[in-house]
Image: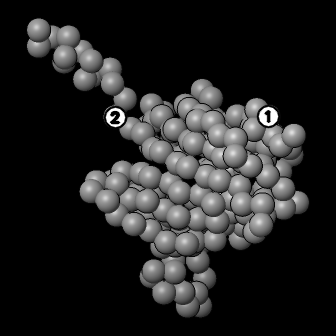
Amino acid sequence: MLTPLLVFTLLHPVHATYAEWEWNPQSKRIELSVRLDVLDEQAIDKAQAKRHKTNTLPRDKRSPSELLVDGRLLYLAKHFRFDVLDGDDDPNPKRYKWIGREEKGAHAWWYIEVQTKGEQAPKSIRNNMLFELDPRYIHQVRCRIKGKSTTMTFRNNEQTQSLANLEAD
């Protein structure tokens, strides 16, 4: 009896993130919430801090908290992207606005607003967060546009998906 449980535990994916986003037609922005394990958040922060140390001029006067947020926004701009199927493959962190962070148990929630190119609802998503750490991550993303919603699953072999089923009539 213990053997099937052990096999299930070993095969069960333990690396996962969850995100929800909704298109806000008034602000013409995506309201994004990302939940990730605090240890994954720390890995992202560590990698971004290392990148920052090698790419920063000595006159950078940002505070440590500003550098932390900027690193997270840069990471999201590269790894959680919108409209990549429409030729908009520009990882511009200036489109991502940090709203805040909340810690709940072993998870951190990041709250972000994203401006899309052309101020239209997105038509595709690429989510390849944390695959550089482990290709077995699974990302669940709940998407909502004008009252229509769907949940998508992103894996290492399926990082980009179309939102054609949510496009407005």
Contact between marks 2 and 1 (CB within 8 A): the answer is no
Q: Is residue 11 above or below residue 84?
A: above
If the image is split into quadrants, where does the N terminus sit? top left
In the rendering, at what x and y percent does residue 115 appear? 75, 64
Picture residue at 33% right of the left edge, 24% below the top: 12
Tell me the SS state at disc 2.
Answer: loop
| Depicted 153 relative to depicted 106: above or below | above
The residue identified by callout 2 is 14
Within the image, what quadrant is residue 86 found in?
top right
Percent coordinates x, y for residue 113 in the rendering:
64, 65
Q: In the rendered view, does 136 fall on the left or right side of 90? A: left
As drawn, 164 above or below 29: above
Query: In the rendered image, is residue 117 in sight?
Result: no
Expressed as whole percent of the image width and height from the top left, the position of residue 53 reads 50, 73
Q: Amino acid at mark 1?
A: Ala
Query: Is residue 145 positioned above or below 162 on the image?
Result: below
How far is mark 2 from mark 1, CA to CA? 30 Å
Q: Nearer the N terminus, badge 2 or badge 1?
A: 2
The residue that appears at 55% across and 72% down in the rendered structure is: 99
At label 2, counting other C-alpha atoms closer than 10 Å, the crowd grade (few under 14, some 14-19, many 20 or more) is few
Which quadrant is the C terminus positioned in? top right
At label 2, the amino acid type is Val
Residue pointed to by mark 1 = 164
166 vs 136, nearest the viewer: 166
Q: Is residue 7 left or right of residue 76?
A: left
Report the disc number at residue 150: none
Q: Position of residue 119 (x, y in %)?
A: 84, 61
Q: Image quarter for residue 151?
A: top right
